[in-house]
Image: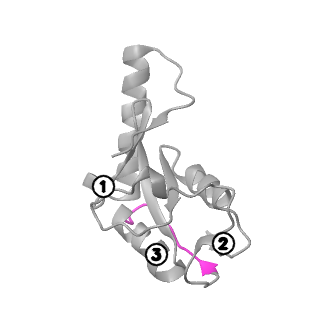
């Protein structure tokens, strides 16, 4: 994933979701500690450009691989690019912050999200095209 000031947050989010369909990225105005959540009031609009919000203006490639932990990904976003990112995982028909499972790999998170969604669909047989966020 290539990070530049001209890209919009939405572009990063879409690219990430193509790799991990049961995960999503959100960006915040404030830092959060590992294992801690980000408050909804600090959520940034996805139409903002990266240059508008980040504190470190490095352009470059962010290598995202499936054996990378959520904590490591969020740390790389912050330390290398000055972006406060938070990974969310699908849980049934909801999106939850992965705070309690920051040590899991992206592959593990994505697998769990897919299994959770499949279970929920099977049990409730409802359309979950527009899940809601859970604010912790």
Judge by depth and name the residue closer to the eye, 49 or 111.
49
> Residue 78: which numbered mark, if any?
3
**Does the magenta portion include 14?**
no
Res. 41 mark? none
What secondary structure is marked by label 3?
A: helix
How far apart marks 2 and 3 lie (CA) works out to: 15 Å
Residue 17 vertical placement versus 4 (above, below): above
Residue 35 in picture, x, y percent from top left: 27, 61
How many residues crowd mark 1 within 10 Å: few (<14), some (14–19), many (20+)?
A: many
Whether 67 is among the magenta residues is yes
Q: Where 31 falls versus 90 (above or below)?
A: below
Q: Is residue 65 visible?
A: no
Residue 110: horizontal and vertical position, in percent? Answer: 42, 47
Q: Nearer the viewer, residue 69 or 25?
A: 25
Q: Give the mark nearest the N terminus, 2 or 3.
A: 2
Q: Which residue is labeled 2 in the image? A: 52
Q: Residue at x 62, y 61 (%)?
A: 12
* Mark 1: secondary structure: helix
Segment tinted magenta in the rendering: 60-69
């Amino acid at each position: 994933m290539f990070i530049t000031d001209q890209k919009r947050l939405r572009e990063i989010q879409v690219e990430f979701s193509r790799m991990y369909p049961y995960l999503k990225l959100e960006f915040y105005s404030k830092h959060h500690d590992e294992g801690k959540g980000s408050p909804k009031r600090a959520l940034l609009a996805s139409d903002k450009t990266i240059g508008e919000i980040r504190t470190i203006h490095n352009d470059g490639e962010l290598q995202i691989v499936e054996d990378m932990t959520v904590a490591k990904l969020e740390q790389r976003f912050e330390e290398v690019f000055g972006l406060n990112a938070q990974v969310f995982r699908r849980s049934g028909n909801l999106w939850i912050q992965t705070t309690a499972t920051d040590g899991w790999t992206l592959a593990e998170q994505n697998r769990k999200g897919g299994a959770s969604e499949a279970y929920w669909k099977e049990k409730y047989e409802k359309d979950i095209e527009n899940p809601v966020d859970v604010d912790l």
